[in-house]
Amino acid sequence: MNATIYEVADRAGVSISTVSRALRHGGRISESTRTRVREAAEELNYLPNAAAQTLAGSAVRSLGIVLPHVQGTYYAQLAVGFERRASELDHSVVLLLVGPDADARPAVRRLAAQVDGLAFMAKSAADDSLVAEIARRRPTVTVARGQLPGLPAVQAESERAAADLTRHLVEHGRTRFAFVGPIDPGSDIAARYAGFTRALTEAGLEVPPNTDLPLDEDSGRALAHEMVADHLPHDAIVCGNDEVAAAVVYELQELGVDVPRDVAVVGWDDIRLARYLRPGLTTVAQPVAGLGALAAEHLHALLAGEDVVEMTVLPTYLVHRQSCGCDAPRPSPC
């Protein structure tokens, strides 16, 4: 039985896209790597022929995506954007959900054996060492989870927008801030906290530690009750996503707190609910589905043996509504 391109990649210690480039004399690749790949192919008697390459080119290749969940809007939009673009590029998609307390390694390794390329869309779904391991065997892209050396990464601009959002609250006279969200090094939430910290430091205000809560509805409600019990220690809450922000707004008002007069609350993502909440939720809009779509495009390019830029950052912009203290909604690209 003939060896496969995956066996050649394993033997040479490179990705399958590198094997493809080395054997067809395409793409930017060092001569030492090209030689190593050729030697591995010869040792395994791997002899690609024109007919096989034509067949492989016409076959539907599958892409995998690894997520912590699809509850709420953010990850669902990421997955939809990825699947739609992959389908347009004639790829099938396999979705893997890995809970925060699960050992992701067995499931991710099984998925990697079934698909031609993988996108990792959350730091909580797989640690960096596992991503690096898979990247040695399959084309791999990371999304909104920080960049690993040598791997294409797709992110939305976070630090600058978070600083602008925080400055806007300072301009409204807010002085006692809280930041809600877990901070993993290199994650988009960490970048937002960095922007939040920078803006408060520039304003000469105290920088609080982050409130390390899951970004979900239950956490938002619990935080609102804790704030009321503690006599409203904050007058501005910067939330890691719109879901937790909406829950904070709703529950504070249920408890008799005036938003935004007593407490301003802002979110992130600009999900559909943000515009229908009362008061309307001030937030940062980011192209969530676009992140997923671009990840699919990068994997498609890698499978074709093309070079892909290591970091792509998509723009974000502030959307001012009433929850920050503004009188009327006014989207404002920044």
Image (cartoon, rainbow, N blue to C red):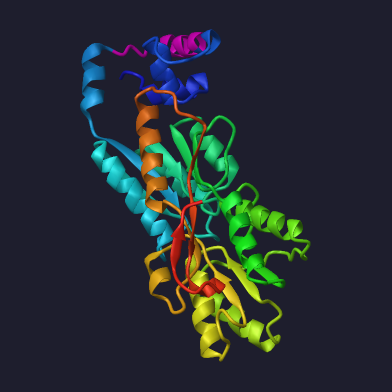
Whether residue 112 is visible, yes or no, is: no
Q: Residue at x 56, y 90 (%)?
A: 255
Please provide the residue range marked out in magenta: 34-48
Q: In this view, does 248 lie above or below 66?
A: below
Confirm whether the magenta stretch covers residue 46. yes
Q: Quadrant of residue 198?
A: bottom right
Q: In the figure, is residue 9 to the left or right of 178?
A: left
78 sits left or right of 253 in the view: left
Q: Is residue 296 above or below residue 40?
A: below
Viewer-proximal residue, 79 or 270? 270
Q: Residue at x 28, y 47 (%)?
A: 84
x and y, in percent, of residue 93 in the image? 31, 45
Q: Would residue 39 be counted in the magenta stretch?
A: yes
Q: Which residue is drawn at 38% across and 18% down?
A: 20
Q: Nearer the viewer, residue 275 or 59?
A: 275
The N terminus appears in which quarter of the rendering?
top left
Q: Quadrant of residue 32 in the image?
A: top right
The residue lying toward the viewer, choosing from 167 and 218, is 167
Percent x, y of residue 3: 36, 20
Q: Is residue 173 visible?
A: yes
The residue sitting at 45% across, 10% down in the picture is 38
Residue 61, image x and y in percent?
Answer: 28, 34
Residue at the extreme front: 327
- Residue 58 position, x and y percent, is 21, 27
Front position in the image: 87 or 62: 87
